[in-house]
Amino acid sequence: MGIQLKSVELLIHLARSGVPFGRTVTIGRQLLMVEGDVVRSRVAAGMGDGAAAPLAELERGDWADPLLLALGAASVDALDASDYEGATLLHDLNEPLGDDLRERFDLVIDGGSLEHVFDFPRALRSCLELVRLGGRIVFMSPADNFCGHGFYQFSPELFFSVLRPPNGFELELALLAQDPERRTPLFQVVDPARLGRRVNLTSGRPVTQWIVAKRVAAGPVLTHPPAQSDYATLWSGGALATAGPGVGRVGRWIRAELDTVQERWPAVFELRRAVRAVVAGPRGRGPTFNDTEAFRRFEWDF
């Protein structure tokens, strides 16, 4: 679990936007996975030299707590099932959250823990319960092509469907990008319910997502288990949008023919796959964000 370059920049963006860090808790203690001079230059660009000054000794591999304090946190706790990394709050997220922790924090940061917790719905509910009214929760998690990293990979659809006012939250920002440690393009994801269709992504490299949501109602959370938006539309008698990329009749015929060829001469496809791997190099083919209705380029404001 760690804070990578794009996660550092997201946190700066939130601080610049006036999001209160106040009492902050991380789900699992977070390591800094960025060189110290890069962190200091980005904090100085976004928050000024004064904010970067306390980070003079911060280096890659250190705990990220000083960064959160520099961005405005009054205190930083870490919640984990074990104290092996110095967590200050011990709790197994497979179990219900105690009353003493509910609605205590201004900012809750999951830097890549929930995909490792087996009882994900329970863990998600507990993380939401940590947030006080008006506070924020941030998820930094694998979205695609990271099979084997944890129990799960998450689609943006999950967060769009869960983080709605009936469940006490309002989703404010959903971003996707490859290579979170590099300056690769960021894309803002449009709510599938707003588009009236699924938002799909096919990629050849690991893709990370960053989700920010605000708590807009106190009391019980996640009381309305969501249905995927396109099914919810159909079940309610609505119609799905027809806009967006599609393969059409000719495309479906070509795919069927290719499937037939692959079944008869699998060696041809194995050779094609090997050649593509050599041409693409060890990092593979990058993600395709060709659906410009659903994925919109996003730039930081600093």
Image (cartoon, rainbow, N blue to C red):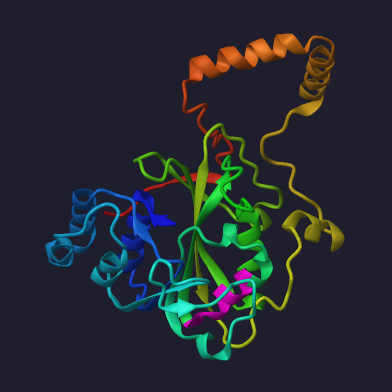
Side (left or right) of 152 relative to 69 = right
Q: Position of residue 134 (x, y in %)?
A: 46, 81
Closer to us: 113 or 237: 113
Would residue 225 be seen by someone viewing this image from the given angle? yes
Can see residue 164?
A: no
Please report the residue visible at 81 percent of the width from the left and 53 percent of the height from the top: 239
What span is colored magenta in the figure? Answer: 123-133
- Give the left or right position of residue 256, taking residue 110 as reference: right
Looking at this view, is 260 or 100 the one in front? Answer: 100
Q: Count every numbered label the image shows and give the total.
A: 0
Q: Height in image: 204 above or below 163? A: above
71 drawn magenta: no
Residue 67, image x and y in percent? 27, 65
240 or 225: nearer the eye?
Answer: 225
Q: What secondary structure predominates along the stretch shown in magenta?
A: helix
Q: Is residue 197 left or right of residue 275?
A: right
Residue 231 coordinates in the image, percent (x, y): 80, 56
Specify the quadrant of the image occupied by residue 117.
Answer: bottom right
47 with respect to 109 (left or right): left
Q: Is residue 124 magenta?
A: yes
82 to 131, vertically: above or below: above
Q: Residue furthest bottom?
A: 100
Given residues 280 and 50, the one toward you in this image is 280
The image quadrant where one finds the N terminus is bottom left
Residue at coordinates 37% horizontally, 50% vertically from top-left? 6
- Where residue 142 sits in the image (x, y, percent)? 54, 50
For the C terminus, give its image quadrant: bottom left
